[in-house]
Structure formats: structure tokens, C-alpha cells
Amino acid sequence: MASHTSGKEIPSIVAGMFYGEIMEDEVFPFPQFSDSQKEMAKAMTEAIVKFSEEHIDAAKFDREGKLPPEVLKGLAELGLCGLGVDEEYGGLGLDSTLYARVFAEIAAIDPSIGVTLGAHQSIGYKALVNEGNEEQKKKWLPKLASGEVMASFCLTEPGSGSDAYSIKTKAVKNNDGTYTITGQKLWITNAGLAGFYSVFAKTDHEDAQGNKVEKISCFIVEKDMPGVSFGEKEDKMGIRASETRAVYFDKVVVPATNMIGEPGKGFKIAMNVLNTGRLSIGSGAVSGMKMILKLATNQAKQRKQFGDYIINYGLIQEKLAAIAANCYATECMVYMTTGKITQGMHFEHESAICKVYGSEKLWDSIDKATQIAAGNAYMKEYPYERIMRDSRIHLIFEGTNEILRIFTALSGLKGPSDDLKELGKIADVSKALQDPIKSLGVLTNFAKKRITKQLATKTLTKVHPSLERHSQKFSHSLKDFSIAVENTIMKYGKNIIGNELAQLRIANMVIELYAQVCVLSRTTSILNSTTISESEKEYVTLLTESICRDSHQSFTKNHARLTSSYDKLTPKISKHIAERDGYGFDIIDY
């Protein structure tokens, strides 16, 4: 995605919440599409829809397990292979917000295509965009932006999924300055389709004391280089038309000019790439939920039971309302994040949260829609089962939701732990959290000082008056959260790294806080508008009411479990399960 143009740097909104702070001037007003952005987005989404009606048959592609080359060519001709590439290199130069909206359109129509194009540009050649030198960009970006060459991101290995720092692929520097790469990568999207591979491999370095150490570097590998080969196409549960294979590197020699960025900086490069890739999952989830809600609504309006259309029954209405709320909340979070990225915000926390929240709400939405469609949904002639299979992967790839929760919690705790160390209140937490989870990127140091938790609750002054009750609840929850952060650091010290259930509670709490403030901001902008109808305002007000109530309840539950004995049950039960290799009971024995 295109870099921001504001010229200023904005600290992470979520990181500030760990201090009990909310940057109200940054959160309000909600980032808006400009007139030119709206025009561009409408033109591109209309073109995508028209192309899909004529050329895309997602059910057929799923059955056959492949995407026709002519479809990918047609999508490339629409500019969809170079959305975020600067125009000087042949791309469309879209900023983060426009990229998210346009990419979401195709991702919803066929997730396999979305994954293919996302693996190509959201992560495949993103390292080149971020860190490549001018010579590399001139050589490769025009071909990649046009779709002449497809790209692939090669990080995951058989022994290193979420723990990316433990990769074994090695790049040995030769006397002539070239590198010889040996190793293998697993579950690589676009593997056999691509001609350009961003490959991450360990390289040898010396530390300050002159000791030999291994660090990760990033290389461009070309498909036709001797020693590059592939495994068989994986037979997947979902996104079946996208290509996933293992990639093997058998003494592949690459020139030194193919290294992206500085030697030994590849891990940070990879994590920065994944930060943007996670936002694509969040934006795709929004359009996916819109499509799912349309299917479910049409089913509910057409299906009669007991003499009435099922849309008039409360239990069906509850599901439809929940899907709409899921969609609105995720949309608010994604476009708050992309809008602030365009203005210069550090967004590691926000992108992780959008991925976690969006993927889980998408899964919840297709589950509810499947229940509404009942028996029809279980049959392959209807799209529900395919959508369910396609949706499940989003909770897993580009960082499992469990790992991203750990990252959110530990990286957020890092800043407050620094301040507590300075106050002499805790010994070595800051050092322990310096690199708490190597698989998820370099932690950001934030320049803020911790506020005293006993001060009066800070209130949001820019929320629309009709939302004041939810604004007050948010403010009180934010204060409770910052106190809980301090108490957690004081309680666990450096051992917080081994207490994943405490991390879970911290992460879940801040996810709900980010959801609430994004929704309150967007709804405030809508209610303050003079061009939006009263019906639309009523609709978003009702959605906001539902989201904030549910979110506050979730926050309260996690807050309570952080200090209760509830989570102590989990390891005890798990120990019994492990000893029995499963459940361990049979009704005929006990």
C-alpha cells in the first residue's frame, strides 16, 4: 500500500490505550473518503463486479481447484496486480484506504482470487516496495504491477510456522559476493505460479564482541534459477483454486544485488510486510460479511415456516442483526486504521487487531448465515459450505489469532513496563519484554510517560450527545484497562511471558476498546452529517448500541477473569487431558 503523505508521525492508538490514554484529536473525526477517492473506488469496484459477472465462477473454480490463466490476465488488465505500486513503476498508486476497499471487492467475490492477488502484492513483493533500492524497483515493479510476473512470499517452513525466527533455510555468502541458498519453504501461496520470490534465509554475521551469529536476510529469487523446485499442489479444505505448494532451494546461487534491504534485517522486513497483509484480511472480511448478510437476508425473506416468512421470527432477526453489527464494527476498525496509516500512524497493533477481529467476526457470520439457510446450506449447490471452507483459513494464516493476541498483549505491555522500571517498582520486566515474541516483529518504543491511574477518568468530548452513555462506559473501561495493565506487570513481572491466559485477557480487552472507539467515532461523523438520511442515522445508531453493549460485556468478562481463579482451571484440566490422551471417560465405565 502506498506510503502516507501527511509528513507527520502518529503514535499507535492502541499502544496509547495501555497507558490509559486516547488521542481524541486523532480518533475524531473518523477518516473520510475524499471525493476523488470515492470516484476511484466506485469506478474500480464497478469494473470488478462487471468482470466477475462475465468471467468469474467461484463454485467452478473451487470444484476444479484452479484459476483460469485468462481470468488472472483479465484482473491484471484492470490494474489489480499493482494497486499500491507508485504510478512511476506502472501501478495505480492507491493509498491504504483505497487499496483496502478495492481489494476487498475481489476478495469477497472469490476468496481464492483474493488470496492469490493478496499473496502477490500484499506480501509477495511488498518487501521490494518497502525496502528495495531504486535499481531493484525499476527492474521488477513494472512487471509485477502489470501481472506479467506474479510474486510469492517465502517465510514459513516445516519447523517454523508462527515462530518465524527459527527458520533453517540458509544463505551462505560466496567469495565472489553471491549467496547460495539451501532450504525449503512450506505452504507457499502462488508457489508454482510466481516468477518472483521474496525468500527469507539465515545469514552469518558478527556481533559487537566479534562472535558469529545468525540473522535473517531477504532475497529475490527467480523461478528459473537452477536449484528451485516445487512440491505437488496442496489439496486444501478451502480457497482451493489458489495455489499452495512447498518450495525447495537446492544450492540456489543469487547475486548480491538480489538482497532486499540491509543484511541481517530480514526479520523486521518480513514483519513489516505481514502488518500490511493482515489489513487485507480485515478488509476482505468486511466485504465477505456484506455478501453473507445479503445471502442470509434473501433466504430469510423468501423462506416460509409456520405460515410466516422466517425473517419475522426473533431468533432469525437476532442472527441477521449480529451479522450486520459484526460487519459495521469491523468496517469501522479497518478504515480507521487505513485512514490513520495514510496520515502517518504506526499500525502494528491495529493491523493485528483488525485481522483477529475481522476473521473471527467473518467466521461467526457465516456460521449464523448457515443456520438461517438450514438444510440448504449443507448442500454443495448452495454457496454457504464453500464460503465456510474458504473463511476458516483467515483465523490461521499471516499469524494465527492466538499468536497475534500474544503479540498485542506483550508489545503493549512493553511501554508501561519501561516506566515502572524507571520508577523502581519492578526489576527486569522491561528486559524480559524486549523481544517477547520473535515471530511477530520488532517492538515499538513509545515516547509516552505513564499517567497516574488514580486520576479522574478521562472522557471523550467529541462523541455525539446521543452516544454519551457508551462514551462514558468506554472511558471507565479504558481506565480499568490501564490499571489492569499495571497490576498485571506488577503481579507477573518477567513471568508474564509464560502466562498466556493473562495475555489473552489483556489482548481481548484492548481489542474491545479499539472496536468501541472506532465505532463511536464513525457513528458520530454520520450523526453529525447534514447529507445522510434520518433512516440511515437510525440504522447506524442501533448498530452502535448493539456493538457497544456486546463489546462492553466482553470487556467486563475478560477483566473479571484476569484477576479471578477461573483461568487457573485451564492448565489443571489440560494436564488431565494430556495424561489420558484425550477425554478419558466412557459412560459404560463410570
Image: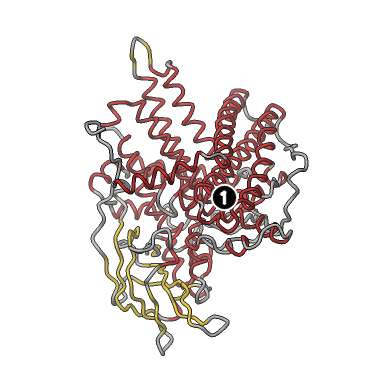
* Residue 79 visible somewhere in the drawing: no
Looking at the figure, which quarter contains the C terminus?
A: top left
Front in this rendered view, residue 140 or 508: 508
SS category of the residue bearing label 1: helix
- Which residue carries the number 1 mark? 350
Front in this rendered view, residue 103 or 142: 103
Q: Is residue 187 left or right of residue 20?
A: left
Q: Is residue 27 left or right of residue 255?
A: right
**Which residue occupies 34% across, 19% down?**
303
Residue 353: percent from the left, percent from the top? 53, 47
> In this rendering, is residue 576 above or below 222?
above
* Residue 41 visible somewhere in the drawing: yes
Front in this rendered view, residue 6 or 352: 352
The type of residue carrying mark 1 is Glu
Residue 535: percent from the left, percent from the top? 59, 23
Residue 541: percent from the left, percent from the top? 61, 27
Residue 307: percent from the left, percent from the top? 34, 9
Q: Which residue is outermost to the top?
A: 307
Q: Which residue is outermost to the front?
A: 590
Residue 195 quadrant: bottom left
Residue 76 quadrant: bottom left
- Assess disc 1: are there few (<14), some (14-19) or many (≥20) residues with their C-alpha within 10 Å of its C-alpha: many
Front in this rendered view, residue 311 or 584: 584
Specify the color scheme: secondary structure
Q: Is residue 565 left or right of residue 15?
A: left
> In this rendering, is residue 281 above or below 272?
above
